[in-house]
Image: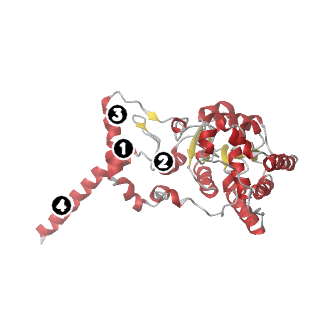
Amino acid sequence: MLNTKKWWLATALIIVLILGALATPIIYIDPYFHYHAPQASLYYTLDNERSQNDGIIRHFDYDSMIIGTSMAENFKTSEAEELFGGSFIKVPFAGGTYKEQNDNIAKAIKYNPDLKVVIRPLDYAYLMDDKDRVRNDLGSYPDYLYDNNPFNDVKYIFNKQILFDICLPMLDEARSGDAATGITSFDDYANWMEEAQFGSDIVLGDRAEYNSPEEIQPFVDEVKEMVHDNIIQNVVSLAKANPDVQFYYYLTPYSIAWWGSQMELGTVERWIAAEEYAISLMLECDNIHLYSFNNEFNLTTNLDNYSDECHHGDWVNSQILGWLYSGTDRLTKDNYEEYISVEKEFYMNYDYSSLLNK
């Protein structure tokens, strides 16, 4: 009986030692920053937004952040720091909804009381979303990295792919003595410019015409309520609760081709009505610095700036940072109705068929 007990104890000890040996490299290196900031002696590649952003928000040193969807991925934090000062991180969530973005800003404020500035594009196409929508179609979040439950960390610290594909190669590089240290720069993190093509041929594809809408979609009360709940929950409430944080928000400037598609669908007036209502809600917060560049027509009508109907090149991101800093196109209670009037007049009356003749 005694020998059996010793055998079980020895077996348990061996299992613990094996598991500890497997877990130690991941805990020490922590490529997703779940436990700590990067080790100074290693080089960390930033290439997994949903796995790494939470750790960046929790453990990095910063007082300013850029967050958003793929519309924010081409921002350069070096340019933001040059204009606004401070130390920026960039934590984009491609396809992330207003709720997903806001939840992560709230987390940044919780873990970093020194947060001063948040720069965030408000994707125009998400204005009429349900307030609680999340993008489950993009794959599930690694929830074990987002919560504070140590028991489900087994999915991380005993992850064979993370150990063999990430951690051990990092250690090998460090042992070689020739590897760099640090992390992928936030200028380069998630930047998709190398794979992108731009211009009217890319944006318009095989479109041969713009048809007249079969019916005009109104801005009905049900849709208005969705806009209200989305903006209040995922934009306004956090700003009101944190008056010392300055939120630089802007409505994303989609291309003239996007507006042409909406004209064909009969939704242009509904989008602009939703925008106007959302603007009125956000302007109730003094610490929301709200912008829209939809009336920068030299930008939106030049399809050389776009890789599809919505996404623009990094030079536009650089220009937007300059506009945010200088106050260009900032919306206020005094000017937003005029802005809406100019916008509506332009996009409702544009000759979209002319795009096909260029």
Q: Name the residue under label 2.
A: 52
Q: How far apart are marks 1 and 4 (CA)?
A: 32 Å
Total numbered labels placed on residues in the image: 4
Q: Mark 1 points at which residue?
A: 166
Q: Distance between the residues labelled 1 and 3?
A: 13 Å
| Type of amino acid at the residue the image marks with label 4 | Ala
Q: Which of 350 and 184 is in front in this view?
A: 350
- Residue at the far bottom: name it: 1
Labels 2 & 3 near each other (Cβ < 8 A): no
Labels 1 & 4 near each other (Cβ < 8 A): no
Residue 227, picture quadrant: bottom right
Residue 28, picture quadrant: top left
Q: Which tag, 1 or 4, sits closer to the chain's start?
A: 4
Q: Which tag, 4 or 3, sits closer to the chain's start?
A: 4
Q: Distance between the residues labelled 1 and 2?
A: 13 Å
- The quadrant in which the C terminus is found is top right
Q: Is mark 3 on a helix, strand or loop?
A: helix
Q: Distance between the residues labelled 2 and 3?
A: 21 Å
Q: Which of 177 and 45 is in front in this view?
A: 45
Q: Mark 3 points at which residue?
A: 174
Q: Name the residue under label 4.
A: 10
Q: Nearer the viewer, residue 7 or 67?
A: 67
Camera-near label (2 vs 3) is 2
Badge 3: how crowded within 10 Å, few (<14), some, or many (20+)?
some
